[in-house]
Image: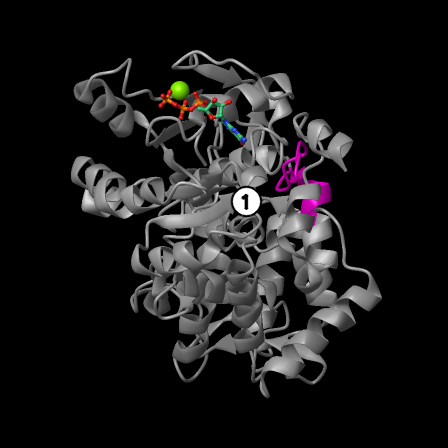
Amino acid sequence: MRKDVRILLVGEPKVGKTSLIMSLVSEEFPDEVPLRAEEITIPADVTPERVPTHIVDYSEAEQSVEQLYQEISKANVICIVYSVNNKKSIEKVTSHWIPLINDRTDKDSRVPLILVGNKSDLVEHSSMETILPIMNQYQDIETCVECSAKNLKNISELFYYAQKAVLHPTGPLYCPEEKELKPSCIKALTRIFKVSDLDNDGVLNDNELNFFQRTCFNTPLAPQALEDVKNVVKRNMTDGVKDNGLTLKGFLFLHTLFIQRGRHETTWTVLRRFGYDDDLELTQEYLFPMIKIPPDCTTELNHNAYLFLQSVFDKHDKDRDCALSPEEVKDLFKVFPYMPWGPDVNNTVCTNDQGWITYQGYLSQWTLLGWVEAVGGCLLSEEDFSLTQQVSAVYNVEGSIFMEASTGQLIPSDRHMAQADLKNSTFWLRASVGATVFAVLGFAMYRALLKQR
Ligand SMILES: Nc1nc2c(ncn2[C@@H]2O[C@H](COP(=O)(O)OP(=O)(O)OP(=O)(O)O)[C@@H](O)[C@H]2O)c(=O)[nH]1
Ligand SMILES: [Mg+2]
């Protein structure tokens, strides 16, 4: 996830860009504003995602076109502001601003755009009828919002959406034209489903769902919430729930629904928890966690590692013959980014009459790897939640070998959004955009909003 967010406001003169920034900062509408606000930085601890956020104003009267281009290339998200009572400023969104921004940014790394209709206090009607076709036409538009710097309406939301567009982008997850998840997102979520399906029966039962929920959001789901989730899936598809558990299809459907309802952060939280970066690739730190091995020391699997490996074997030895058929081995490594064991493994370890790797052979292969490869990535990439015991180095201290297990450090302790995420998941599908906003009440700016109500 990004370490900071840079929001740029552009738009026709006098639509209220500077006033929006000033209203956000001072929590009241300024009667007089300079042409251009100084760049402001909101410190990490008062933003919902704990990421420092820079807000940058633009004024045609004060800045050259070159300066504008420079700011566009530095921005992580651009708010194109128009005034809801000024048709020309709306027309300019498509005739001027979007083409100008697109010309200055790489096609593959377009910055997300947010359409901001300011001065909603001046009109009775909404500009959405005009705006929605524009949103459908341009995929880079992440969202739109109508607001009023004067009434302080939707000001904090606007900046929250902008921040969210950077930190939890739609692009890698979802194709708005097809209205479905993108293939790389399906691939990642399928892997997550498989890792979470502890008994490997193709369905997430209540236990597994709770385990998943705890792993991702630090808290289990209430029994009623579990039922609610399953009911929503059942209502929408025939094969999303089977044997009272969630199928892969149902799991993918839920994530599609989150995204369609603007709750990308839920899906991103899950993906990041399982090691994915912003391009939906597994990160190096996840695949190859650092294990510090002091000089002159060797490594060895500890008891917890063996317990974990045993559970993985059990999970995949479906026919219970105490050996893994080639199909079962393939299934076991499906959650890996590559197949770490070639066919030669079966020539070096114990196999059964059919030449399949036995439980003993399987463990001895891991034991060997523990010695020669310091275990590392391969094993940990499986890193189920059942692997709350990580394999760690064995220190050879004063001639005695002992093993050290680290437990349960997989869940980041400082999860600022945990409560919000809990809300997400408890009320998952009933959530409205308004609820998204209230889920981040930690955001100091929201006080202004609350006062208003
Ligand atoms: N009624 C109403 N007036 C607003 C609102 N926001 C801004 N204004 C007024 O619109 C005028 C222009 O506001 P600015 O904030 O200077 O607009 P700007 O987009 O920064 O303009 P430039 O810096 O010239 O590009 C000022 O008179 C503001 O008081 C609003 O929400 N409602
Ligand atoms: Mg201005």
- Read off the residue under disc 1: 123
Against 142, is 241 above or below? below
Callout 1, which amino acid? Val
| Residue at (28, 23) in percent of width and height | 71
| Residue at (73, 59) in percent of width and height | 427
Q: Quadrant of the N terminus?
A: top left
Q: Quadrant of the C terminus?
A: top right
Horizontal placement of 133 versus 446: left or right? left
* 154 inside magenta stretch: no
Q: Nearer the viewer, residue 85 or 324?
A: 85
Span shown in magenta: 405-421
Q: Name the element at disc 1.
A: loop
Q: Nearer the viewer, residue 35 or 49?
A: 35
Q: Nearer the viewer, residue 288 or 296?
A: 288
Does residue 52 appear anywhere in the picture? no
Quadrant of the rendered structure where residue 398 is?
A: top right
Q: Nearer the viewer, residue 276 or 397?
A: 276
| Residue at (52, 69) in percent of width and height | 252
Horizontal placement of 322 versus 427: left or right? left
Q: Position of residue 91 (x, y in %)?
A: 30, 46
Does residue 31 appear anywhere in the picture? yes
Against 106, is 53 above or below? above
* 414 inside magenta stretch: yes
| Residue at (18, 22) in percent of width and height | 65
Colour convention: one colour
Q: Residues within 10 Å of mark 1 (few under 14, many from 20)?
A: few
Horizontal placement of 190 versus 450: left or right? left
Q: Position of residue 323 (x, y in %)?
A: 51, 76
Extreme residue in the right direction: 223
Against 295, is 239 above or below? below
Magenta segment, prevailing SS (helix, strand or loop) = loop
